[in-house]
């Protein structure tokens, strides 16, 4: 097992380029099941979750291969299995979005329910209700969702909450369904929009992606396509927080600022310079940080996936910041690890009050999930002495070559084997 060692105190300076979005790449990879022709994707990040997705698709009969460092070819000439096993789905909950395309392609699907999650309940009831509304028969047996439909039929679907995964699953199931499908209260995230763009390139008829109402006219078949995955807005926000906490000056060459308005607004409120220029987006801080109030919300609100990183940054603000988490009920587990480093955080239900500035000192800390691990690294960049972060396999699920990127900006960070 590896750990990350962070020697704090060095301001980040320089230029960095983001990897492709993991949260966009994974459902797009599952869309390869919808055609017998090759789907070629570029700007795919080299991550553990991407490997898991390729392993799952391979088990289903898809020929999956890396063309080069960040290009993948997925060719589902023939789907040989209709089962997504528990061993893979439990490893990566995003695997559950295989249900829609697998059912649409083969008429049946047997997909493991994902099980528990460290940051809270993430039920799949919205996925199931949407697939049922398209005419599928569904049973729950032995921990699996078993779906069957001779031919899916379009329908009108209202999502009780704008779930990204449910929107993606229903969207992929509907593109070859008979007739018209309308998804109301759909997720608006950029990753959903990127999936829709790929499906349109493959021959689907979709309108409204990026709004709360998505309309799909079913087509008989889809064909192959080539597509470049969007840059990772969560990696961008993480780098922004890292630059801010260290008093650095960093330019992110391909930051999708149009996807980060809520984040940029809160950073500016905290006294951080966020400006687009000819080279990309520049993040800089010369003076102290100011406290802010923020609430996590579905897009275009402040993303829950950046809450831990912002909490770490706000430990250095001069005053009390208030963070309210509305998406996941257990997503403050990193707070107790930050407290081990000297942070002053008071938690009550879904709200955390971060009182600063705190003098952070390096300590052994443990990652509880992917985004919490990044929050702890950000805190370590500003701490005195050395922070040792264990369980960094979480990081490798969602951040490509993170230590190398931070090192290129002047951070003193390295990997080592745990004793």
Image (cartoon, rainbow, N blue to C red):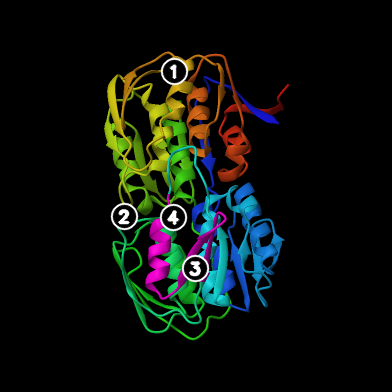
Of badges 1 and 2, the one in the foreground is 2
Element type where label 3 sits in the image: helix
Residue 226 appears in the rendering? no
Nearer to us in this view, 158 or 288? 158
Q: Earlier in the sequence, mark 1 or mark 4?
A: 4
Please state the horizontal and vertical placement of residue 254, each as a whole percent of the image.
Answer: 48, 51
Upstream in the sequence, badge 3 or badge 4? 3
112 or 341: which is nearer to us? 112
Labels 2 and 3 touching (C-beta < 8 A): no
Residue at mark 1 to residue at mark 4: CA–CA distance: 34 Å
Q: Secondary structure at mark 1?
A: helix
N-terminal label among 3 and 1:
3
The stretch drawn in magenta includes residue 141: yes
Tell me how far mark 1 sits from mark 2, CA to CA. 33 Å
Residue visible at 70% across and 24% down in the picture: 418
Q: Which mark is residue 248?
A: none
Badge 4 element? loop
Mark 1 and mark 4 residues within 8 Å of each other at the beta carbon: no
Q: Is residue 226 above or below residue 21?
A: below
Q: Look at the image and give the residue range highlighted in magenta.
A: 123-147
N-term-proximal mark, 2 vs 3: 3
Say which mark, if any, is on residue 100.
3
Q: Is residue 339 above or below residue 400?
A: above
Task: Determine if the magenta segment contains residue 223.
Answer: no
Task: Give the Cα distance between marks 3 and 4.
Answer: 12 Å
Mark 1, residue position: 339
Q: Which mark is residue 161?
A: 2
Contact between marks 1 and 2 (CB within 8 A): the answer is: no
Badge 2 vs badge 4, beta-carbon distance below 8 Å:
no
Provide the residue designation for mark 4. Answer: 124
Spatial CA distance of label 2 from label 3 is: 19 Å
């Amino acid at each position: 097992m590896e750990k990350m060692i962070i020697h704090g105190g060095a301001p980040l300076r320089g230029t960095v380029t983001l990897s492709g979005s993991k949260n966009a790449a994974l459902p797009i990879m599952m869309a390869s099941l919808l055609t017998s022709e090759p789907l070629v994707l570029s700007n795919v990040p080299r991550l553990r979750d991407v490997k898991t997705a390729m392993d799952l698709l391979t088990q289903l009969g898809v020929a999956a291969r890396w063309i080069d460092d960040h290009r993948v070819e997925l060719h589902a000439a023939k789907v040989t299995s209709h089962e997504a096993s528990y061993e893979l789905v439990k490893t990566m909950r995003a695997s559950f979005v295989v249900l829609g395309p697998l059912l649409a392609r083969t008429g049946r699907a047997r997909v493991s329910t994902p099980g528990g999650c460290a940051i809270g309940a993430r039920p799949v009831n919205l996925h199931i209700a949407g697939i049922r509304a398209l005419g599928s028969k569904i049973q729950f047996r032995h921990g699996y969702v078993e779906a069957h439909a001779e031919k899916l039929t379009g329908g009108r679907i209202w999502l009780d909450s704008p779930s990204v995964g449910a929107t993606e699953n229903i969207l992929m199931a509907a593109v070859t369904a008979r007739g018209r499908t309308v998804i109301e209260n759909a997720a608006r995230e950029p990753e959903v929009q990127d999936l829709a763009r790929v499906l349109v390139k493959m021959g689907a008829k979709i309108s409204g992606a990026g709004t709360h109402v998505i309309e799909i006219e079913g087509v008989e078949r889809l064909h192959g396509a080539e597509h470049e995955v969007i840059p990772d807005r969560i990696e961008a926000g993480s780098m922004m927080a890292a630059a801010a906490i260290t008093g650095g000056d960093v330019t992110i060459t391909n930051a999708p600022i149009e996807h980060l308005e809520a984040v940029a607004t809160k950073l500016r409120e905290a006294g951080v310079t966020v400006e687009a220029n000819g080279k990309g987006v520049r993040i800089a801080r010369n003076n102290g940080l100011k406290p802010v109030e923020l609430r996590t919300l579905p897009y275009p609100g402040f993303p829950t996936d950046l809450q831990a990183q912002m909490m770490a940054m706000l430990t250095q603000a001069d005053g009390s910041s208030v963070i309210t988490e509305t998406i996941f009920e257990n997503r403050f587990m990193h707070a107790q690890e930050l407290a081990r480093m000297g942070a002053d955080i008071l938690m009550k239900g879904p709200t955390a009050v971060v009182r600063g500035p705190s003098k952070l000192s390096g300590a052994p800390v443990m990652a509880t999930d992917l985004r919490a691990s990044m929050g702890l690294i950000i805190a370590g960049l500003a701490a005195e002495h050395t922070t040792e972060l264990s369980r960094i396999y979480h990081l490798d699920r969602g951040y490509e070559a993170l230590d190398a990127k931070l090192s290129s900006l002047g951070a003193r960070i390295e990997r080592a084997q745990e004793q």
